[in-house]
Amino acid sequence: KQLNILINEMNLPLDRIVIDPSVGALGYGIEYTYSIMERMRLGALTGDTMLSMPIICTVGHEAGRAKEANAGADEFPGWGDLAERAVMWEAMTAAGFVQAGGHIFVLRHPRSVELTRRAIDQLMKK
């Protein structure tokens, strides 16, 4: 929030700012980022204009760094095929961030894009 205030004071319009919550969570994991996103959305819903910008989620980069998306099946045989697991890890991370209030998603794998779109479509059904 403070960064948004300072950037706006430098005459950058608020409609040109996006928030990247994963930067503050480096090393803390997806749970910390999810919690930050929830608090930002709640703040925006209560009228805090400095938290009402779109949230960008660099899921592909962040999910790709996780042990679960990189460890080979020989190291953890119960985790299954590495290629399928990496795609699912990225898609599930994106689905969680959708539910936490993310707006813009940067994904790496075309299959995870497809799965994320499907999850959003399911959430939007009446």
Image (cartoon, helix red, strand yellow):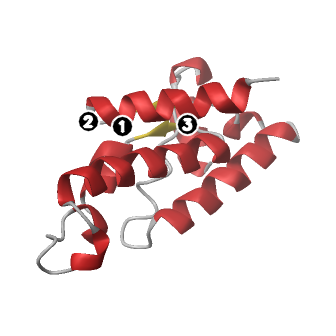
On-image quarter of the C terminus: top right
Query: Does residue 89 show up?
Result: yes
Disc 2, disc 1: CB below 8 Å?
yes
| Amino acid identity at mark 1 | Ser
Residue that numbered label 2 is attached to: 109
The residue at the point 72 percent across, 55 percent down is 39
User: Which mark is on residue 55?
Assistant: 3
**Viewer-side residue, 93 vs 61:** 93
Mark 1 secondary-structure assignment: helix
Instruction: Give x and y (percent) for residue 95.
Output: 54, 44
**Viewer-side residue, 90 vs 62:** 90
Disc 2, disc 3: CB below 8 Å?
no
- Vertical arrangement, residue 19 with respect to residue 118, above or below: below
Instruction: Give x and y (percent) for residue 96.
Output: 57, 50
The residue at the point 66 percent across, 44 percent down is 99
Mark 2 secondary-structure assignment: loop
The residues tagged by marks 3 and 1 sit, at their Cα atoms, a distance apart of 19 Å
Residue that numbered label 1 is attached to: 112
| Amino acid identity at mark 3 | Ile
